Image (cartoon, grey):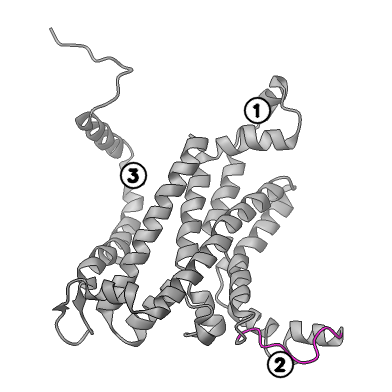
Amino acid sequence: MAKKKNPGAPMNKQDKWTYTWHMVKVNKACYGLLAPFMFLFIIFTIIPVVMSLPIGFTNFNMVQAPEFVGLSNFYTLFLNDDVFLIAVRNTLIFAIFTGPFSYILSFFIAWLINEMNPFFKTFFTFVFYAPSMTTSVYVTWQLILSGDSYGYINAVMMDLGIFNEPQQFLTDTKYILAVVIIVQLWISMGAGFLAIRAGFQGIDKSMYEAGAIEGIKNRWQELFMITIPSMGPQLLFAAVMQISTSFTVGIVGQSLVGLPSTDYAAHTIMNHATDYGNTRYEMGYASAICFVLFLVMLLANEGVNKLLGKYLD
């Protein structure tokens, strides 16, 4: 007589694979649509990340064959490369300001937009998302922050008597880091912001009616007791996107203040990898930098998933 399985018992590894393969066959049309993206993702993301580790142990200049150098690149990176230490400091500052702060800002802006009528929902969603889609944003900010009297900020401040002469926002080390952080925050309303907006749209309105019956009295209680727990997948996705954006920030500083910036004031790990990979063609050293950055992002992602997962599950 066959032994019956307990429906409540956890699945073993074989049962999980069987169930997963069954769901793939049931939803084969959906997976077929995902196939082109997955193919490109594997080619342009997974394979380069996997290849960066072995290349990081070599001296490779794109012309000669790679020469194995062991841990020499990593030793130089952490013990002899002073610019890398500056890049680590700047990257952590960027990650703190453009990670958690941008994540919280995206959530509350999406929350406020969700309270508007349909026209303003669409309008303000586009207004906040548009900067992440266009490259002309850097031209706009260069005009605003121009270091002569034609720059908008300098012109206004000099007319008001606050500045006696134009300030060099894009070259003075007093301003560079703050300027890049502000611009990065402004363009950070990307996929994570849209995911949060979609999360608000997907909440069943009857849950708020049930909450009112159960004693929820104001919008803040609704937010923390109904809204946030109902948006677990979207909030986790947005957190992952913000981590990726905050640690790989580099193009903003490069476009605004150049590469390298004055006294490396806005130099990040990504800029350091770009410098060695695209300018000096020291691909082994650049791969070592990228692999270290990948490990930091992986650890940060795991930490955030555990932190948010306990609350959102």
- Dominant SS of magenta comes to loop
Reading the chain from its start, which is encountered first: label 1 or label 2? 2
- Per the rendered image, the range of residues in magenta is 161-170
Q: Position of residue 256 (x, y in %)?
A: 57, 82
Please say if 160 is above or below 222. below
Cα distance in 3D space between marks 3 and 1? 32 Å
Q: Position of residue 53 (x, y in %)?
A: 24, 66
Task: Residue at 76%, 33% (x, y): give it.
Answer: 218
Task: Residue at 62%, 86% (x, y): give it.
Answer: 172
Q: Nearer the viewer, residue 165 or 274?
A: 165
In which quadrant will I find the N terminus? top left
The residue that disc 3 covers is 29
In front: label 2 or label 3: 2
In front: label 1 or label 2: 2
The residue that disc 1 covers is 206
Residue 51 location, quadrant: bottom left
Dot 2 lies on which element? loop
Amino acid, disc 2: Asp
Task: Residue at 68%, 29% (x, y): give it.
Answer: 208
The residue that disc 2 covers is 148
Mark 2 crowdedness (10 Å alpha carbons): few <14, some 14-19, many ≥20: some
Residue 221 location, quadrant: top right
Amino acid, disc 3: Ala
Q: Residue furthest right?
A: 160
Tell me, yes or no, whether the highlighted magenta stretch contains residue 163. yes
